Structures are given as structure tokens and as C-alpha cells.
Amino acid sequence: PVVFSLGQGALLVDTGDPVPEEYDAVIRKEELILKGDKVFIKKPVAPGDNIRPVGEDFPAGERLFPSRHLLSPVDLACLLSGGVTAVRVWPRPRAALLPTGDEVVPPQSHPAPGQVLESNSTMLAGLITLWGGCPQVLPIVPDDPGLLEESLDRALEENDMVLVIAGSSAGNKDYTAQAVARKGQLLTHGVAIRPGRPVILGVARERPVIGVPGYPISAFICAQLFVRPLVYHKQGLIPPPWPRLKARLARKVFSPLGVEEFIRVRLEKEGKILWAVPSLRGASTVLSLARSHGMVAIPPWVEGYGQGEEVQVYLLPWVQEKGVRS
């Protein structure tokens, strides 16, 4: 082995210490023997070995991240490593959730006959949080046009968008559309989808206002189609594609022409085949949504799909992380 004397050709350094300029390589402790002030080198090294050069991670002047980039925890570490301690960002969009209806009451153990437990705001708040927004659930507003407009005014003052839950159909006590029209511009009342047809899209005080249907399945679909892009846009981001996969339909389904229908399905593996099993249909069956893995979109010009036909399944947010069990 080669022998050095400490201070004469060799110097002890710890991991992370700077290496003096007169030295050009580091030998790991496991590859040498220390005897007094003598260092016995058991393995050869080349210049630069085991030394992290200055600017190895990123050179001075390099742009670390582009504009409209969602900063991850690792990105934050990169910024701090480069000496960047502050950056300009888009704020998380604030979304007001305004539940309405005389029959709607806060969740409780023993509702009276005819009362509806308010759960849509919790579902929508969770989705908005998942997409990067800051939801605010407001008190339930009864079916009164004046009270609804007052609540809408307050919500617009403090938030970047407002979701009015229920009151979007054509009933005698559905006042959302007229409230939006009085406070701003009603862009559309109703779209060609099912469930979710009576959704309301409008603008008031230069802020989006969405009238979300009261049925939970309709509310979920409208949130995915109309609220999700808004939340991402308000952060300066392009919404990521809705994750999807291919599966074979387990049984035949029919769909009316003229509307795009979203069918809830469960995914089941049988050998190498992935089957999409249609769940219960209907806009109010929230348990069927919770037990589903995805949705199949049937275009408005198609009357349905046959058994065994290959379809695209759009995965639901709570399935994307867990996966599908066989």
C-alpha cells in the first residue's frame, strides 16, 4: 500500500467538509488504515474521486423551474439548495360552497321525515382540496330568493368562485338561476349530460358561479367537468388528463341519444381480462358511487354498448391511489 503522513500529502476530512484546493481526491475510511500519523492506502483513486464538484447539481444562472409549474416537495428542496428562499406563486383559489334548500339540514343521527342530510358540500370540499383549492363551506340557505342573493353577495366578496348547491332544477323553489342572472350573467342553465343536466354556469363580479345539482352523483360529475378545470386554471395550471384505462363491459347498457351519459362501473379482474361491471344508475345513489372504481362515458350519438365491448373507464380519484384488486 501507499503510505502518507498526515499533513504531508494527506488530510483527514469528514463527509460534507470542503476539500482544500491542493488536494484532488478523497479516499473513504473503509479503504485505508490509520496508524498514528501514517495513512496506509489500500485502494487506488483517480483525481476527483469521492469529491462533489462545485456546481455539480446546477450551474449558476440555470433556470430551475419554468413558469406555471406545480412545485413538489423535491422542487422546494432544489430551490433552497440554490439559495432561492422566495418565489412568486399563484395563490390557492378560494371556493365558497353554498348549500341551499328548506329540506336540507346539517348531518345528524336522527333526521325528521322529509329532511335531507347535507353531504354534498363535504364531498365537493374534499375534491377541491384534492385539486389544490381552499374550500369554505357556508351555512345552509333556505329556499328564499332574497336570502340566497344576500348569501351569494357575501360569498363573492371573499372567494374566487362560488358553488351554489341545489336549486338548479325547474321546481317552484329553485332560485339559483335567477339569483345568478340578477347578480351577473347567466351563461347556461342545463347541459347535455346525464346525470348533471340542470347545472348552472354563470359569472358575477368577474368570478365563476356554478349551480351544482343537488343529487350527489350529479354534483360529483359536474364538479369533475366544470369545477376541476377552474380550480387548476386559477392556479395557472393546465388540468392533468383524467386517468383512464380499457376494460370490457360485463353486460349490455342502453343510453338515450342526445346526451352524454356517465355510467358508474366496478372493475373486476378475471385472469388477464379486466371487466367493467355497471353499477346502479340514478343520480341519488351515492353508495353506488362510493363502491365504484370508474365511469364510462357514452357519447350522445351512441345508444349504448354491448356485452364484452371494450370501453374507456375514467378512474375515480379515490381509486387512482389504491388500484384495483383482482
Image (cartoon, grey):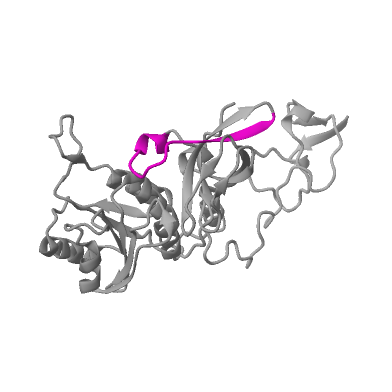
Give the camera-side residue of 276 and 320.
276
273 magenta-colored:
yes
Q: Is residue 312 above or below residue 110?
A: below
The image quadrant that residue 185 belongs to is bottom left
Instruction: Give the quadrant of the N terminus.
Output: top right
Pinpoint residue 46: horizontal percent, then vertical percent. 85, 44
From the viewer's side, name the closer residue of 196 and 38: 196
Residue 113: quadrant of the picture:
top left
Vertical arrangement, residue 87 with respect to residue 78, above or below: below
Q: Which residues are magenta?
A: 272-290
Q: How many marks?
A: 0
Rendered residue at 47%/60% (across/down): 258
Asked whether, in this view, residue 51 is left or right of residue 192, the answer is right
Asked if one can make out residue 292 in the rendered structure from this viewpoint, the answer is yes
Q: Is residue 201 magenta?
A: no
The x, y position of residue 299, in whole percent, is 53, 55
Look at 46% across and 63% down and name the residue there: 87
Nearer-the-camera pick, 271 or 54: 271
- Quarter of the picture containing the C terminus is top right
Left of 191 or right of it: where is 56? right
Q: Is residue 192 above or below residue 14?
A: below
Using residue 307 as the reference point, say whether residue 179 is left or right of it: left
Picture coordinates of residue 215, whole percent (x, y) = 31, 47
Residue 12 x/y as whole percent: 69, 37
Relative horizontal placement of residue 261, taking residue 286 as reference (left or right): right
- Res 132 seen here: no
Q: Place residue 62 in its image quadrant.
A: bottom right
